[in-house]
């Protein structure tokens, strides 16, 4: 990433959250926006969404939230009661719900939406100085969205609309482009900022921390084989390179463990050796064996460290910026419970027409909810 004009190969996967493989592309749903950079020091993953925020901020709620997005165990139908019951009991979701139920809840295509790292991360420079940062991929095609009516029509006529659009655009040389920006916050500001900067249900005001352009992403090649590359690609916020580190964001801390665990279950213990996931530089480690080990498995070389046989040494060449930690190890909630200011700010940014569509979408989505108390709790 250092140096003007440096080019880093990358692979990006767009996805849905609630919709399983084969479901209509144009359903109202957050879009996954995950980028794998094949850097000179190994792979770096930014595992984001097309929203700068998320529904929850505590990782303990993560499995339950995902359960609400899946099908009812008896009827095997989507379950609006579960969705709204969870949101109504989780007021921190309101900011993301307002975004999702608004016009940007259904992107026109994958090319016409922004992408975000969502979480707060830390950068450390060569002098050992650290800053907090947030990633923003801003589409050069412009943000375009679908109305409920058009999205429903496309779901019936061409459920693979987004997949087809992206493939065809790249194939004919109309390469989608995004500018990459970061917001930078001095470390000490985290102690005094008016919102918790590590709360993924909140954003940093761009008036306080303006966007700084750092790069450009161009998608100029389609996968040769969808299964080998797209389906078998694995992304984790714990896949990092020197100079990039995580923050005390509770949701991010949980994701660091969850994603690698999911990869071992879904793809296999040696998923990082697959061509799409393998680094473009030599990776020196002592990991051996495991299901589906399909290379030389290290041959007869030494398989532990430290050793007397000139094997690679584990040396932390790029030390992260240190920060003091004190207190009691415990399960502790966030200090701030203002779940309404930023959701309200988002609403106030909308035009009257956008607000009307937002209300109509929420009403239509909540109508099938079985219990009146869930509707009343959410409305309040």
Image (cartoon, rainbow, N blue to C red):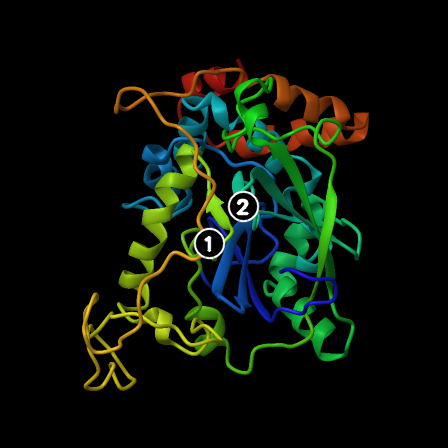
Residue 68 appears anywhere in the view: no
Work out whether residue 222 or residue 197 is closer to the camera in this orientation and state it: 197
Which label's residue is closer to the chain start, 2 or 1?
Answer: 2
At mark 2, the secondary structure is: strand
* Mark 2 vs 1: CB contact within 8 A: yes
**Mark 2: few/some/many CA within 10 Å (<14, 14-19, 20+):** some
State the residue at coordinates (65%, 37%).
184
Q: How many marks?
A: 2
The image shows residue 202 at horizontal and vertical percentages of 57, 28
Work out whether residue 168 or residue 372 is closer to the camera in this orientation and state it: 168
Work out whether residue 274 or residue 130 is closer to the camera in this orientation and state it: 130
Q: Is residue 33 above or below residue 249?
A: below
The image shows residue 9 at horizontal and vertical percentages of 60, 71
**Mark 1: few/some/many CA within 10 Å (<14, 14-19, 20+):** some
Q: Is residue 360 above or below residue 10?
A: above
> To which quarter of the image does residue 312 belong?
bottom left
At mark 1, the secondary structure is: loop
The image shows residue 217 at horizontal and vertical percentages of 69, 62
The quadrant of the rendering that contains the N terminus is: bottom right
Label 2 and label 1: CA atoms lie apart by 9 Å
30 to the left or right of 271: right
* Residue that carries the numbered disc 2 in the rendered image: 124
The image shows residue 155 at horizontal and vertical percentages of 61, 57
Mark number displayed over residue 163:
none
Mark number displayed over residue 318:
1
275 to the left or right of 134: left
> To which quarter of the image does residue 124 belong?
top right
Work out whether residue 320 or residue 286 is closer to the camera in this orientation and state it: 320
State the residue at coordinates (60%, 17%).
194
């Amino acid at each position: 990433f250092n140096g003007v004009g440096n080019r880093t190969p990358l692979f990006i996967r767009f996805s849905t959250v609630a919709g399983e493989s084969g479901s209509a592309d144009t359903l109202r749903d957050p879009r996954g926006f995950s980028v794998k950079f094949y850097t000179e020091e190994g792979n770096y993953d930014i595992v984001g969404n097309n929203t700068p925020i998320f529904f929850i901020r505590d990782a303990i709620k993560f499995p339950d939230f995902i359960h609400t997005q899946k099908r009812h165990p008896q009827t095997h139908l989507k379950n609006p009661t579960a969705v709204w019951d969870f949101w109504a009991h989780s007021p921190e979701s309101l900011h993301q719900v307002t975004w999702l139920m608004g016009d940007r809840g259904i992107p026109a295509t994958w090319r016409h939406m922004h992408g975000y790292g969502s979480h707060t991360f830390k950068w450390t420079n060569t002098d050992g100085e650290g800053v907090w940062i947030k990633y923003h991929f801003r589409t050069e095609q412009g943000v375009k969205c679908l109305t409920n009516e058009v999205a429903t029509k496309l779901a019936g006529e061409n459920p693979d609309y987004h997949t087809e659009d992206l493939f065809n655009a790249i194939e004919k040389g109309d390469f989608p482009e995004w500018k990459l920006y970061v917001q930078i916050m001095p470390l000490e500001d985290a102690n005094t900022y008016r919102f918790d900067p590590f709360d993924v249900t909140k954003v940093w005001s761009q008036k306080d921390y303006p966007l700084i352009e750092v790069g450009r992403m161009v998608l100029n090649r389609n996968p040769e084989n969808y299964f080998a590359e797209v389906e078998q690609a694995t992304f984790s916020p714990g896949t990092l390179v020197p100079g990039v580190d995580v923050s005390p964001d509770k949701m991010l801390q949980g994701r660091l463990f969850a994603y690698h665990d999911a990869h071992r279950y879904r793809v296999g213990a040696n998923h990082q050796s697959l061509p799409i996931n393998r680094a473009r530089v030599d990776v020196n480690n002592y990991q051996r064996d495991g299901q589906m080990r399909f290379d030389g498995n290290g041959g007869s070389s030494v398989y532990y460290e430290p050793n007397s046989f000139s094997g690679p040494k584990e040396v932390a060449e790029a030390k992260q910026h240190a920060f003091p930690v004190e207190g009691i190890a415990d399960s502790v909630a966030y200090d701030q419970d203002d779940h309404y200011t930023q959701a309200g700010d988002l609403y106030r940014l909308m035009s009257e027409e956008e607000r009307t569509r937002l209300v109509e979408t929420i009403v239509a989505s909540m109508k099938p909810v079985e219990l009146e108390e869930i509707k009343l709790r959410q409305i309040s």
